[in-house]
Image (cartoon, rainbow, N blue to C red):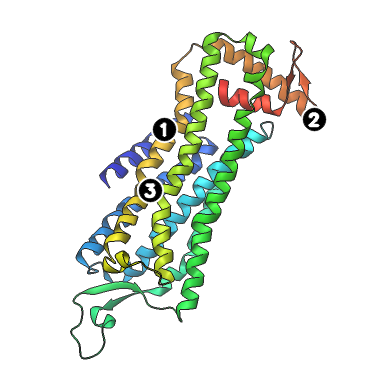
Amino acid sequence: MFIGITGNGGVLIAFTKNRRLRSARNIFLLNLIITDLLLCVTAIPVTPWYALTKNWTFGALMCRLMPLSNSCSVFVTSWSLTAIAIDKFVHIMGPIRAPVSIGQASLVTAFIWVVSTMINIPYLMSYELVDGAYYVPNNTAPFCGLFCDEINWNGETPRRLYGSAVVLLQFVIPLTIITYCYTRILAKVASDMIIQNVQFRKSLSTAQREEATNRRKRVNYILIGMVIAFIGCWLPLTVVNVLKDFRLEPSFLLEQPFFWPLVAHVIAMSTVIWNPLLFFWLTKRKKAQTQTPRFSVSLNVFGTTISRINSMQRKSYNSTYNSAGFVFNDISISLLLLLII
């Protein structure tokens, strides 16, 4: 919790103080930071305490609000990562399109929050604070303490249907979209026409070629790492929830009904550590530009070239040739932006 608050709080402070970070694309990253801070002050301390003490001490109102807050934060995290993937996909595949504005990014973020809250309203209605006697037959010794549990479902079928819908909307669909977007981006980077173009490679110095290659590798590592981190954080908790919804718990889960869900919860909450690192890596390129002037001349040349090419492509949707006589199409422009700048 301390690491999550420190890391995400530091990013939030940097975002408010640094104007260069106030871009439309960073709105989605900022959304991740806000949900992480919310998880740090709600789910991370409360869930382990409840699992270890086996007694809900936070009142009936919090019993209803806490599941709603936690699940809503998870939804927002998943779909914010999805929005980042879609934004990068559109930016790379169609570099001459107008970039996302801050207003558009803010609307998408608000839409994610509203829809996520509406989807998770059933959690608000289903959870209730009950006495331990609820779980044992009459005339037997009751469990001690109070429990916050889902009891307001009209049978197992509605609960299972809702649980399945949550898994699809919170994990399966976002993972599918993220994997598709990053796979297409990786394929485009692999077919880089700029670096593979012999005539263009000859115009670059050895240092520039190495820099472009290193940037391409870093893009690969970041994109693959984002998918792995998403799966690694949320898959264990998703599997545990599905097994519990369908009463398919293996023996070890039945023997330790609090311990293994707590382990899955800890793994899922590690996302509050990875998201600040994600923000750092995705904004590192901008920081490097302001700190390292060694490619400033080349960047100005490329920037001018790109501006002219984009202007010509808006007038005609054909390939455009530069003064050296080789083709700059959409792939070239996008990878100039991604690998050189």
| 159 over 261 or under it: above or below | below
Q: Is residue 231 left or right of residue 60?
A: right
Q: Amino acid at mark 2?
A: Tyr
Question: How packed is label 2: few (under 14 Cα within 10 Å), some, or many (20 or more)?
Answer: few
Q: Secondary structure at mark 1?
A: helix
Label 2: which secondary element: loop
* Relative side of 236 to 320, left or right: left
State the residue position of label 1. 280
- Specify the label residue 335 is tagged with: none
Quadrant where the C terminus sits is top right
Q: Residue at position x 52%, y 55% from top?
A: 172
Q: Earlier in the sequence, mark 1 or mark 3?
A: 3
Q: Is residue 90 above or below residue 172?
A: above
Q: Residue at x 66, y 31 (%)?
A: 95
Residue visible at 18% across and 76% down in the picture? 144
Amino acid type, residue under disc 1 in the picture: Phe
Q: Which of the marked residues, 1 or 2, is nearer the chain's N terminus?
A: 1
**Residue at 40% of width from left, 41% of height from top?**
275
Q: N-terminal of the two: label 3 or label 2?
A: 3
Q: Is residue 101 visible?
A: no
Q: Quadrant of residue 235?
A: bottom left
